[in-house]
Image (cartoon, rainbow, N blue to C red):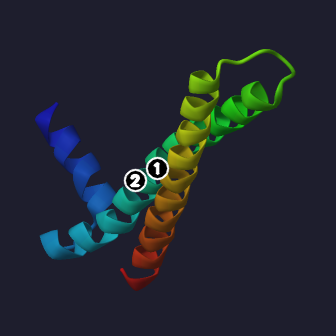
Amino acid sequence: MRDREQSVLVTLTGNRSHSQRRRLAEPERLRERIGYLKFWQGVVVVTDISLIGWLLSPSDHAMKQSILAFTAIVVLSFGMLHLHRRIDRRIEQIGTV
């Protein structure tokens, strides 16, 4: 069993050195990180849109709730922008690796 695992590992990695395998793994790690950041960016976008819809819906909201919702919308929008910039930097890193 051990020989089979080693042969599979050699087949997958070839005759590459550790540093070469690490360089090949780096873009994959960055892609995973981008996927994770995109997930959270999607969560922020959906929450932001939901709050905007709630705030614009015709109902009697207390002033305190409206101010709190507006503040949350602003914070979430800046969070969305921050996540977008982080994703963009990770994409640039993939190009340089």
Quarter of the image where the N terminus is located = top left
Residue extending furthest toward the top: 60
Residue 44 appears anywhere in the view? yes
- In space, the residues marked 1 and 2 are separated at their CA atoms by 6 Å
Quarter of the image where the C terminus is located = bottom left
In contact (CB < 8 Å): disc 1 and disc 2: yes
On screen, 61 above or below 38? above
* Residue type, numbered disc 2: Arg
Q: Position of residue 74 (x, y in %)?
A: 57, 48
| Residue under numbered circle 2 | 33
Q: Position of residue 54 (x, y in %)?
A: 74, 25
Q: Nearer the viewer, residue 66 or 24?
A: 66
* Residue type, numbered disc 1: Leu
Q: Residue drawn at (54%, 41%), measured in percent from left and top?
A: 71
| Residue under numbered circle 1 | 37
Task: State which quadrant residue 14 falls in.
Answer: bottom left
Residue extending furthest toward the front: 63
Q: Nearer the viewer, mark 1 or mark 2?
A: 1
